Amino acid sequence: MTEYGNSFGNDSIDWLYREKIFGDIQKFPPQLLDSLLCLRGVDIIDSHDIGTGFSKAETDSLAKTSATLAQISERLELPKSTAHRLLGVLLQRAFVRKTVESSRYRLGPGFIGLCSHYLNNLELKTESSPFMSELSKLTGNTVFIAIRQQDKMVYVDSEEQVNSLRKYSIIGQQKPLYCTSLGKALLMGLSDEEIRQVLSNVTFAKWGPNTHTNIESLLQDIRESRRRGWALDNQEAEPAINCVAAPIRDYRGQVIASISTTWILAQHPEIAPEQIAPLVMKAASGISTNMGYIGESVREQAPQSFS
């Protein structure tokens, strides 16, 4: 208890226990406590539905003006030390900012980033849906959309020719960047040095017979992927499965997601990655255009069915 008490303050720890967030605090890393306290700190910004924080009018007031530590402590019915600790977490993440002259708090730019990510994900799923459907029909294969979260890729949508519960169960699942075509396509928008930094704490575990075992091998693969415009998972994430993916860019030209199609080698021995890649790139290009990207687009090509 001492370690966390020194880090977060005894009253903050008391709140965590009082709210029954968990039973044994020693089992949780400081990063998790930080996140939990940050969630509690959001009450400072908007808690009119909770009943112990700001009213809607007070929330609007804070958004437009500012408030002192004493005012925030009083409105949330928290000790000043607890409110100060919560504000500290929010300050670190730029959710609030503090004026040096008056020591008053107001909303910070961190919320802009949160709203941007949220809106981008909503827009991405809307804009990608027809392209995913078309790609799945042309190939007869499952199509995925993924985004990057730190050193992992996360599935955000999928399209199959046969209705399946798997479509919903896979959403939110994470996999490594280094052994998936979706992950490697997401890395194509980064420089070699940025990739080194992103994967600096990653152990290259073997997921399939051809999984990259070190960063240099992966970087060589990424360079080739950039050159041709698509990434390949050749039995790297799991045996007997191949995937081809291409990056999706936004209005800034930054890679914000990737799209892939995957197939079982034994079921589709006729499919070659080089044949299916243009279809995947065309889908990625269409989604990118709808997301505001005005760079080079993939030329129209005659549809080819692999089913």
Image (spheres, rainbow, N blue to C red):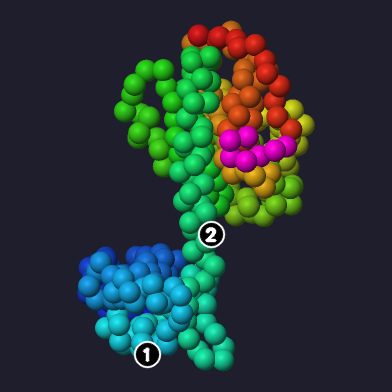
Label 2: state its secondary structure. helix
Is 78 positioned to the left or the right of 91 in the image? left
Q: Position of residue 96 (x, y in %)?
A: 49, 74
- Mark 1: which amino acid? Ala
Circle 1: element type? helix
Tell me the tag on residue 70.
Answer: 1
Residue 291 on the magenta span = yes
Q: Position of residue 17 (x, y in %)?
A: 25, 73
Residue drawn where x is 46% and y is 51% of the image = 118
Mark 2 crowdedness (10 Å alpha carbons): few <14, some 14-19, many ≥20: few
Q: Is residue 169 visible?
A: yes
Q: Quadrant of residue 40?
A: bottom left
Q: Is residue 51 magenta?
A: no
Point out the tag, 1 or 2, that comes first from the N-terminus.
Answer: 1
When the figure is inspected, residue 64 is found, relative to residue 128, above or below; the finding is below
* Foreground of the two, 173 or 26: 173
118, above or below 123, in the image: below
Q: Please tell me which residue is depicted at 25% across the width and 66% down the height of the picture.
A: 49
* Quadrant in which residue 260 is drawn: top right
Q: Amino acid at mark 2?
A: Gly
Pick whichever, 138 or 270, lies toward us: 138
Circle 2 residue:
113
Instruction: Classify 10 Å Cα crowding around label 1: few (below 14), some (14-19), many (20 and above).
Output: some
- In this picture, which residue range is highlighted in magenta? 289-295
> Can residue 29 be seen in the rendering of this structure?
no
Look at the numbered discs 1 and 2 and tell me whether their residues touch, using CB distance below 8 Å: no
